[in-house]
Image (tube, grey):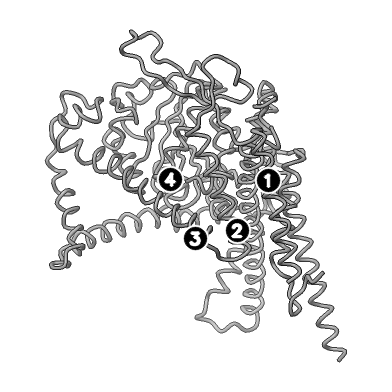
Amino acid sequence: MQFLTNGQLDRRWIFLGMLLAIASPILLQVTFPEKPSPKTIDVFNAIDQLSESSRVVIACDFDPASAGELEPMISAIVRHCALKRHRMIFLTLWLPGAPVIKSNIRMLVDEFPDYRSGIDYVDLGYQPGAEVVLKVLTSNFKKQCSSDTSGRNTADLPITAPLTTIQQVDLIVSVSTGFPGTTEWVQYVGSPHKVKMVGGTTAVSAPSLYAYIPRQLISVLGGIKGAAEYERKIMDHYPQLEANQSAREGIRRMGPQFMGHMLVVTLIVLGNILFFVEKRKGTDR
Amino acid sequence: MKADKLLAGILLVLGLLVIIRASSGDMGMVYTRAVSTPSDAPPELRWTKYEAATPIESNEPGVAVSWPRTLGLWIAALLTLAIFSFLLGDNVLYKLAEALFVGVSAGYAMVAGIYDGIVSKLLSKLAPGLIRDSLIPGIPETVEPDWLYVIPLILSGMLLWRLSPKGGWISRWPIALFIGTTAGYRMVTYFEADFVGQIQNTIVPLLVFAADGSFDGVQSIKNILMVTGVLSTLTYFFFSVEHVGIVHRVSRLGIWFLMITFGVGFGMTVMGRIALLAARLEFLFDDWLWLIDPLNRRS
């Protein structure tokens, strides 16, 4: 069978190899043990050490294109906040982020039926204006968010009624994938107003946020690995989650990660061996 | 050519397997439960809400196959495969899926933008009574029109002048204002949070001692590496001095730090892309093909 054309491997074989590498652990339900890293533990502690009924802003600044990485992360954070009985204020600076909030609220209400809208959580939906929104939130919360997505006045909702600025919340959790995202939250809210913040981001964006740790940002969950470690950490502390298969989404996706990475590493090593063999052949001639 | 035939054969076999499985009815069905809500309201004020149900609940009262949602699931699965087909080469299925994505995204952005932007942030300030009666009932009766919002309304109108065949220059004024304001905002925050903040983050002790006076070797190595990395990388980008002698050696070290950073970036990118592919395959295998059942929805 002809794998090589003019000395080049047809890249469709690589695609097929990657498909098999990713699909096989999903079909066989292979998972690996996760050990939370110090960064994950810092995010966990930031949420876990808050007193009960603390107000936590959860910013879902991403779209369905990044949901594969960030959906397990934000679900784990919402579960953790609910287990700690924190009050959650959801908002997004991304237009496609609104359905992400809705799906997390559905999950919240399904798993924690005693959580009440307007008292324990509120959906402020999409806030257009990118960084200008953050600027206004730091000076006049209700001017920016006068109503929730159901059209209720935020001044009448127990969860938002006492807030005049966003600095009064106990923690901001920014889960984002690009602009506007965690960087803007740090620049406009966290850093200038000394508001406690943790972040969660796609693996690609994570290195750019590490520079803010720990003075401007407590810690960051990076990509699906961060999500899987976080799921493990909350399961270790709240064993009642062990039976909840939805709470293992990130852990399940680490099986394909392992196989995919093994394939990439194998191909890089093989490519280098072939390169040096070809080079030696050329020198011999 | 043989490779093409083999790949085509694999795809054909997979397609046949899907057709066989679909014909048995053991895949790609979505169930919903009809719930009358609010339950405490009189019958004439109730409406029926359809909540997601699992196949295992299909025999329960009120649970039935939802054909619109089933159709949506099949469209999502087939569009995913159409996008994947680009890996074999550009083709009409990929183009169709791409065009649909662009069109649907634009439509969604326009509708949501009108409601969340124009109605919620502009019209609710200019005509609170009208918006309260029609779209946002939570606006208090006491709220008066805020005429300051006429300014953004006028600026928005000026911006739309760009579409007019004459007087396009009028749109430059709101654009100029927007760019000027954004630049001002960003300059201040960037200087404070990134420039000064990052310098502060780099001023760390090279030898770290714990609270009990013991030497913290790990943190010391971390700090030394960070400071060395920052200084050597900055040296590489410092072109006012010729890169010879010690400057050359330090800038070479900076290149190593840069290369390691790019390697980390590549590794992280691979991880991100694999996670996205895994999520799509999970959707295909679980929601569509019913080959796996990680959430125990069918057994």
Tag 1's secondary structure? loop
Do tags 1 and 2 sit on the same chain?
yes
Do tags 3 and 1 sit on the same chain?
yes
Do tags 2 and 4 sit on the same chain?
no
Mark earlier in primary sequence (3, 1):
3
In this rendering, does residue A37 appear at all? no
Please report the residue visible at 52 percent of the width from the left and 49 percent of the height from the top.
A65
Please state the chain letter of the residue tagged with numbered disc 4 in the rendered image. Answer: A
Percent coordinates x, y for residue B1 in the rendering: 73, 72
Do tags 4 and 1 sit on the same chain?
no
Mark earlier in primary sequence (1, 2):
2
Query: Residue under circle 4?
Result: A185
Observer-side mark, 1 or 2, equals: 2
Percent coordinates x, y for residue B146 in the rendering: 14, 37
The disc at residue A159 is none
The span from disc 3 to disc 2 (Cα, nearest Å) is 10 Å
Query: Residue under circle 1?
Result: B209
Please report the residue visible at 53 percent of the width from the left and 58 percent of the height from the top.
B93
Please state the chain letter of the residue tagged with numbered disc 3 in the rendered image. Answer: B
Above or below, A87 against B187 in this view is above
Tag 3's secondary structure? helix
Q: Residues within 10 Å of mark 4 (few under 14, many from 20)?
A: many
The disc at residue B95 is 3
Q: Residues within 10 Å of mark 3 (few under 14, many from 20)?
A: some
Left or right: A53 in relation to A256: left
Q: Amino acid at mark 2?
A: Ser
In this rendering, does residue A258 appear at all? yes
Q: Amino acid at mark 4?
A: Trp
The disc at residue B85 is 2
Q: Amino acid at mark 3?
A: Lys
Q: Are marks 4 and 3 in contact (CB under 8 Å)?
A: no
Observer-side mark, 3 or 1, equals: 3
